[in-house]
Image: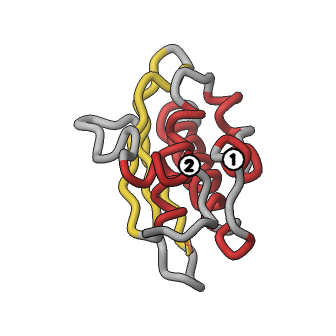
Amino acid sequence: MFGEEYSDKVIDHFMSPRNSGILPDPDAEGMCGDPNCGDSLTIYLSVKDNIIEDISFLVYGCVAAIATSSMTTELAKGKTLEEAAKITDKDITQALDGLPENKLHCSALGAEALKDAINNYYVRYRLK
Ligand code: FES
């Protein structure tokens, strides 16, 4: 169905995305869109004592965009804001056991939307 290019982990996260949907009362949200392919991702954060207590996402995109969004939330959950801000597209790709060359850019959506959400959290709660 998906060809042989996707790892088992990518297919697993595509078929059963973790943390999908909108948090009821998020502390911050962040977005990233790729104008070339049209895919876009929004990440929602719930933060307590500087820790990402809950996180969710809504994505419009390809198989890899869904899987990388899901993995992004798994990697970020339970981390401090500073730790989560350091998650890179390479971390996300590695955690999924790799992506096909033409799908590497999909992991950037997760890393960038997460950073955007963290920045928006800082703006909302710390820079007042
Ligand atoms: Fe662009 Fe997947 S094809 S994010």
**Quarter, ligand 1:** bottom right
Q: Where's residue 110, x and y in %?
A: 58, 53
Residue at label 2? 8
Q: Which mark is residue 64?
A: none
| Distance (Cα) linking label 2 and label 1 | 8 Å
Q: Is residue 80 left or right of residue 12?
A: right
Q: Is residue 76 left or right of residue 57?
A: right
Contact (CB < 8 A) between labels 2 and 1? yes
Given the image, on which type of amino acid does mark 2 rest? Answer: Asp
Q: Quadrant of the N terminus?
A: bottom left
Residue drawn at point x = 59 percent, y = 85 percent: 36
* Label 2 CB sits under 8 Å from any ligand 1 atom: no
Who's the residue at 59% across and 34% down the image? 75
Q: In the picture, residue 56 is in which quadrant? A: top left
Q: Give how far across and how far down residue 119 sits, in percent.
A: 59, 45
Q: Residues within 10 Å of mark 2 (few under 14, many from 20)?
A: few
Closest to the observer, 64 or 121: 64
Residue 21 placement, left or right of 30: left
Q: Look at the picture and state if 110 lies above or below 64.
A: above
28 over 65 or under it: above or below:
above
The x and y percentages for residue 104 are 70, 66
In the rendered structure, which disc, 2 or 1, sits on the residue that comes first in sequence?
A: 2
Q: Secondary structure at mark 1?
A: loop
Residue lying furthest top: 49
Residue at image location 61% in from the left, 53% down from the top? 7
In this orientation, which residue lies closer to the viewer: 35 or 100? 100
Amino acid at pointer 1: Asp
Residue indicated by mark 1: 97
